[in-house]
Image (cartoon, rainbow, N blue to C red):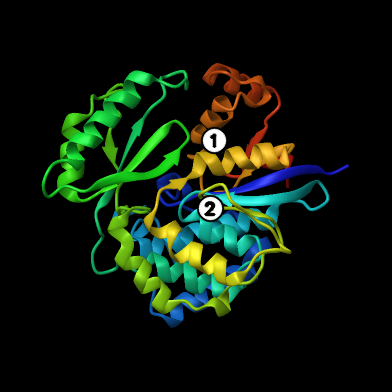
Amino acid sequence: MRKTAVVICPGRGTYTKTELGYLNRHRPRVDNFLSRLDSRLAALGEPTVSALDGAKTFSLKTHTPGEYASTLIYACSAADFMAISQDKIEIVAVTGNSMGWYTTLALGGSLDEAGAFSLIHGMGSMMRGGIIGGQLIYPVVDEDWRYAPERAASLAKALADVQATPGCEAHPSIHFGGYAIIGGNEPALQLLMKALPPVDDNKYPFVLVNHAAFHTPLLNGISERAFATFGTDIFQAPKLPLIDGRGHIWQPYSTDPRELRAYTLGHQVYATYDFSRAVSVALKEFAPDYLILLGPGATSGGAIGQILIENRWLGLENKGDFTRRQAAEPFLVAMGRPDQAPLVV
């Protein structure tokens, strides 16, 4: 009997130096897909995903800008998705974090291959001439992944003070498990870095490299450009249920492609992306046997673990519970981990 699974598509920042060669490991199985993707990029004079993945060294300048990173991450996620065994696994829904929403649309059947490339590469290239603002990350849980009211209060006060400062603009960008991701302009982020108490051995707060103020009103102009660029024709009703950044479920037989376009190019671009709610809805509405986190990497695993704890899912109450469960009987299967991927391939 097949196990059920909700697939989770990661966002930006997940392809790091440890992921070099990720696609090459998949190559025999997805060679045709990667060749077509490479051809589309080459026709635009862009570095191919094969060249980026096959580079000798990882470069922030080459691997992290949106115009390159978005398509590279999509390629890795799609390759992992194709590796999931249909004999072992019944995929009951797809969701994602931030840029992972575009991948969700592609893998869930709302975009064909050409439409997926057009949207993912196009949206990733919107700020080629200069990034608008940035993102800062700060935990609102303690080291044991339990809600930390004092950290949340520090963040709320710092954010309110910055929002009241002339010339500063900052907004909640992503609810990412136990982490708050704030999007803002440069003056706002500088003030937040100074105002927030350092935590977790001074690891936080920190600003995410080459990230814009995604999912905030600072990107209203990007939304307008997106509506002018992408028509309804590339969107279609999905083949699988999709869970968006509000926790809304787009069902195969009731989705209006016009509404899907309106959300994807509108609210999804300039309003807070609630990844925590998306995963919570996946758990409660679909009760899967597994959550499958696509690659590259597995850096979203901690945030997903924190969401499980927040929901007391499987009786998990802290990081230790999650770690022990994962060691004994993984519920979260990260395709980027060689010790977990065999469960579903």
Q: Are marks 2 and 1 in contact (CB under 8 Å)?
A: no
Q: In the picture provided, is 170 more to the left or to the right than 297?
A: left
- Could you say which disc has been placed on residue 32 in the image? none
Q: Kindly identify which residue carries mark 2.
A: 22
Residue 33: % across, % down? 62, 69
Q: Nearer the viewer, residue 149 or 55?
A: 149
Q: Quadrant of residue 304?
A: top right
- Could you say which disc has been placed on residue 304 in the image? 1
Residue 234: % across, % down? 56, 76
Residue 54 is at least partly visible in this image: no
Label 2 packing within 10 angstroms: few (<14), some (14-19), many (20+): many
The residue drawn where x is 59% and y is 54% is 25
Q: Secondary structure at mark 2?
A: helix
The residue drawn where x is 56% and y is 47% is 247
Q: Secondary structure at mark 1?
A: helix
First in sequence, mark 2 or 1: give its number: 2
Mark 1: amino acid: Ile
Q: Nearer the viewer, residue 237 or 205?
A: 237
Quarter containing the N terminus: top right
